[in-house]
Image: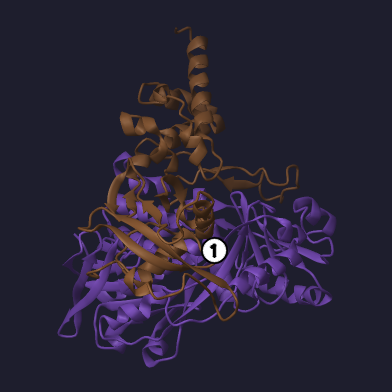
Amino acid sequence: MSHGHVVVIGGGGTGAAIIHDLIQRGFTATLVERGELTSGTTGRHHGQLHSGARYAVGDREIARECMEEVRILQAIAPQALEMNYGLFVALTDEDVAFAPEFIQACREATIPVREIPLDQAFRMEPHLNPEIKMALQVPDGTIDAWRLPLHFFATARAAGADIRTFTEVVGIHSRAGAVTGVRVLNHATQEESDIAADLVVSATGAWAEKVAALAGIHIPVTPAPGTMVAVKKRLNNMVVSHLHPAGDGDIIVPQRGLSIIGSTQWKTDDPDTVEVPRADIDYLTRRATELMPVFGETPFHAAWSASRPLAGASSNVEDGRKLSRDFIAIDHGRSDGVKGFISIIGGKATVLRAMGEKTVDLICDLVGVQEPCRTAETPLLQHRAFYNPHLVTKGAAS
Amino acid sequence: MSDSPQNDSRHNDQPQEFQTLSGEPVRMVRFRIARPQREEQWGQYVVPVKGHTTLVDALEWIKSNIDLTLMFRHSCHHGSCGTCGMIVNNKQALACTTRVMDLVEEAEAAGEDRKSFAIEVRPLQTMDHLGDLAVDPARLFRDFPVDADYLRPSEANKGSEVPGEITGYQRFENCIECGLCVSSCPVVTMRDFMGPAGLAAYNREVTKHPERSGELLPRVDSDRGVWGCDRHLACSQVCPTGVYPAKHIVQLQKKIKKTKQESGQE
């Protein structure tokens, strides 16, 4: 008794959460991804589990949502998180003067924040710049950028989702102003085939403009890549951030045996041809060294860039329902005359589950189905289960 | 989709080495990439490479500039996800932490001819092939304890103070489940063997959770388990994150022997 068949385009964090939620609420679904899962933006993200503190001054709502999702992810996917908290450190008097506003904003967003005496901060993170003037603790952490989405994919797959990698959408079919399916190219066989659908969701982020164009729709999306640099040693256990209005190169996220500084941001035309600018590596290393001087002395491990999407101005983007302050869903039935086609743009890894929930809420509205979301209370299968659906303990996924 | 996935000819007139306007040296490097499911079997590509260009960057360049259907797995680009294992010049490696210029310098030091030299890239062996360089890692996970704990205490800054809200700093395991060890293991290619990655995972799990020994040790106490290891040590040599699977296999063997002695068997 399916509510309908949905094709989700894009195997990133957004697609992962959407297909999991769709299956939970009684839809059948196929997810197609032109490469490996999370090979676009999601897998290359900085890896920070955001308490929301970084966003609190700018937007309480985004911050509150982050905090809520941190609590939920700890319950449903603890194995995909290093939950070690974070320190915001003040480097200048100006930073210290910013603290009261920051603390107030965090409290309003329900983020537990407290000042840590400097001697204690150095006992927590001995590599901190000895010149820091203040340290505030918040519940930040680290995400495994591959394995967290895989938790969602694994759970969806075990419950019947059809997930196809190396399968590229080359056409979107519609009849009488409504979407009817997609045409896909299987990269392995080089053969094209059709997948019928009642609804098509493009969860392709920086690629959303290219995908919408397949349906003859224009949505302006500017790919905005950012660079990250990792050194070959774990220098910190807590996420270390610069206490100031959010900017470039002001967060060092630890992960496994690495410490990672990020990020920068620039704009480009093509999300596929992103190269790491040499100057970014030098700039980020310099910024990291301000927070933890030893960073600059530590052997280089890797530098990479990820294309995030910036949605531009146009009538359909403005019409787009802002499902949260930082991500939008465009119902192309309303804005472009193609019913059953939705584009999702934006969001962040920490709130992927919430993005799935809100997108599927919208889908339920569109098809007139009343089915509550249960993903916040449903523990996810571990990442390895994605490859072993037959080994999964019965009951865990349903 | 392209009829000719080779781009050799269009670069024949280009200099082999040049500088960008900003002064960064660029070198044109030739790649020979296995495409076993294709008629041509191999693709030849010449790619502009800078000092920090990695193999995965080079593959992405080929994908976006020459053939959008080139198949390879990749995700994090910094050696944490474990998806981009390949065989590079006959050695298992992660594409994302392999610097192309290191391979070029290696070849030059070995006296390779600069003009004809090509970096050869093949998919990992012993796993089901999806296409080009992409494999299905299901074989790797088949013999994993599927629910094994992926977290462990962090060793960084030993003795440092911990926030009151948690009992200790935690981190993800070193093992990124990339399968390089399984692909390099001579035993896996010869006979049915659980393989180094899975056995190492079993050892980590019983070390962290001794209470699971009774359930887990019997699963590896067999010829396809710990007793199948011939100690070639290839696994420990190719491991990109210092897991040393061979060491874990020996530890598991000891744990099994000890358990049997204690229970009076053997």
Image coords of residue A171 (percent x, y) = 22, 76
Which residue is more in the foreground, B123 or B225?
B123
Residue A356 visible in the shown view: no
Image coords of residue A273 (percent x, y) = 43, 74
- Considering only vertical position in the picture, is A247 above or below B118? below
- Neighbours of disc 1 within 10 Å: few (<14), some (14-19), many (20+): many
Image coords of residue B261 (percent x, y) = 51, 10
SS for tag 1?
helix
Image coords of residue B214 (percent x, y) = 46, 23
Asked if residue A251 lies left or right of residue A202, the reply is right
Give the colour scheme shown. Answer: by chain
Which residue is more in the foreground, A274 or B80?
A274
Judging by the rendered image, the residue that carries numbered circle 1 is A68
Instruction: Name the residue type under label 1.
Output: Glu
Give the residue at x 50% y 41%: B239
Name the image quarter holding residue B29: bottom left
Q: Residue furthest bottom?
A: A315
Q: Quadrant of the N terminus of chain B?
A: bottom left
Residue A151 visible in the shown view: yes
Which residue is more in the foreground, B16 or A342?
B16
- Considering only vertical position in the picture, is B180 above or below B132? above
Which residue is more in the foreground, A363 or B93?
B93
- Considering only vertical position in the picture, is A366 above or below B121? below
Chain of the residue under the numbered disc 1 shown in the image: A
Name the image quarter holding residue A55: bottom right
Judging by colour alone, the chain drawn in brown in this rendered image is B
* Chain A shade in the render: purple
Give the residue at x 67% y 62%: A112
Q: Quadrant of the C terminus of chain B?
A: top left
Q: How many marks?
A: 1
